[in-house]
Image (cartoon, rainbow, N blue to C red):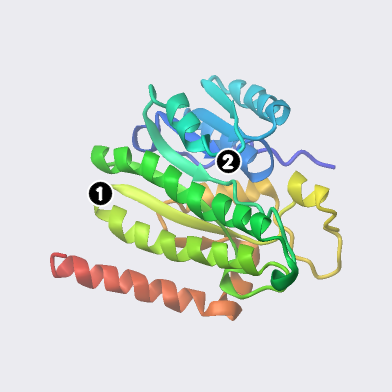
C-alpha cells in the first residue's frame, strides 16, 4: 500500500497569523484528524490534539512534531461530564485560532424504537452538545480578536434520513444548519466557518467497524485528500462537500442551489447594512 501522507508539494498553506498560532483538533489521533494535524504542522501551526486513546494520540503527536511545531495531547472522552472543562483548562494559556471538530463518528446505530435510548443520547451529546460547547469556548475569543477559523465535520447522512442511523443522520443535519447560521454570524467578525461534509472515508474507525472498502460501486475518500480539501476551502463556507460526494449531495437536497441562496441573502443583508 502506498504512503498517502501529505508532502511539501501538495500541502495547503494555512496562514498562522490568521488561523494560529495554535489549532485544536477534537478527534485528532487518527484518520482525517491526524491528516489535518500533519498538514497544519507543515504550515507552522502548533497543535492541541484531543482523542480518547492515548497511544494513538502520542503516535500522531510524534509524527507532527517532526515538522518542528509544539504539540499538546489530551486523552479525553468527550462524553465525560468534565470534558469541556478539561479542554478549556488544557488550552487556557494558548491562543487558539483554528478549531476542527472531527469527533462526531456514529457511535451507535439501531432501529430507533427498539434501540437503547441512553446510547442514542450519547450520539446526540457527542455530535451536538460537545460541538456547541467547544465552538463557543474557542469561537468567542476568535470573534473578539477578529480572525480565526472553525471546521465542523459533517456527513452525507445529514441530507436524508437513514435506516438504523436516524439519530446520527438527524444530528448531522443539525450540524449543517448550525454551520450555516454560525457562518452568517461570524463572517463580519473575520472568522471563517465551514462544515466539511464527508462520505465513506478510509479511516481506522470505519475499518474497525467492518466496512468493506472494496465493495463494487462504493465511493471511498482518502483521509489525506479530505483534510487537504477542507483546508483548501476553509474560506468557502458555510458548507463544502468533498469532491467524491458532491453528486450525491446534489441528488439528496439540491445542495448547490441552497448554498447560493444563502450567500445571495447574506450579500443582500450586507448591502442593507445589516
Dot 2: element:
loop
- In the picture, the quarter occupied by the N terminus is top right
User: Can the viewer see residue 238 in this picture?
Assistant: no
- Location of the C terminus by quadrant is bottom left
Residue, disc 1: 189
Query: Counting other residues with Cα less than 10 Å from the Cα at mark 2, is it few (<14), some (14-19), or many (20 or more)?
Result: many
| Residue at screen point 29% across, 57% down | 185
| In the depicted structure, whether residue 225 falls above or below residue 213 | above
Which one is nearer the viewer's eye here, 141 or 66? 141
Name the mark nearer the viewer: 1 or 2: 2
Q: Is residue 117 visible?
A: yes
Q: Which mark is residue 78?
A: 2
Q: Tell me residue 248's x, y (percent).
A: 63, 74
Give the quarter of the image for residue 97. top left
Q: Residue at 59% of width from left, 69% of height from top?
A: 246
In the displayed structure, would residue 244 be above or below residue 38? below
Residue 241 location (% of width, % of height): 55, 63
Does 170 sit left or right of 19 as displayed?
right
Amino acid at each position: 500500500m502506498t504512503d498517502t501522507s501529505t508532502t511539501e508539494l501538495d500541502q495547503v498553506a494555512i496562514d498562522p497569523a490568521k488561523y494560529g498560532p495554535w489549532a485544536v483538533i477534537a478527534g485528532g489521533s487518527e484518520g482525517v484528524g491526524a491528516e489535518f494535524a500533519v498538514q497544519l504542522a507543515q504550515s507552522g501551526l502548533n497543535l492541541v490534539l484531543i482523542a480518547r486513546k492515548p497511544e494513538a494520540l502520542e503516535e500522531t503527536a510524534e509524527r507532527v512534531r517532526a515538522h518542528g511545531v509544539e504539540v499538546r495531547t489530551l486523552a479525553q472522552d468527550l462524553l465525560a461530564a468534565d470534558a469541556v472543562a478539561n479542554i478549556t483548562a488544557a488550552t487556557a494559556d494558548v491562543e487558539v485560532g483554528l478549531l476542527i471538530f472531527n469527533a462526531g463518528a456514529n457511535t451507535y446505530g439501531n432501529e430507533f424504537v427498539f434501540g437503547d435510548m441512553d446510547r442514542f443520547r450519547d450520539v446526540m451529546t457527542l455530535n451536538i452538545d460537545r460541538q456547541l460547547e467547544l465552538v463557543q469556548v474557542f469561537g468567542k475569543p476568535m470573534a473578539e480578536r477578529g480572525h480565526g477559523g472553525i471546521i465542523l465535520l459533517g456527513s452525507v447522512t445529514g441530507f436524508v434520513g437513514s435506516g438504523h442511523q436516524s439519530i446520527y443522520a438527524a444530528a448531522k443535519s443539525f450540524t449543517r444548519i448550525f454551520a450555516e447560521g454560525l457562518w452568517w454570524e461570524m463572517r463580519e467578525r473575520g472568522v471563517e466557518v465551514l462544515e466539511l461534509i464527508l462520505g465513506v472515508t478510509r479511516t481506522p474507525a470505519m475499518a474497525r467497524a467492518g466496512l468493506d472498502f472494496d465493495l463494487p460501486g462504493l465511493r471511498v475518500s482518502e483521509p489525506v485528500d479530505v483534510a487537504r480539501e477542507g483546508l483548501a476551502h476553509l474560506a468557502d463556507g458555510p458548507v463544502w462537500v468533498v469532491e467524491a460526494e458532491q453528486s450525491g449531495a446534489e441528488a439528496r437536497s439540491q445542495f448547490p442551489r441552497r448554498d447560493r441562496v444563502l450567500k445571495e441573502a447574506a450579500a443582500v443583508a450586507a448591502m442593507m447594512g445589516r
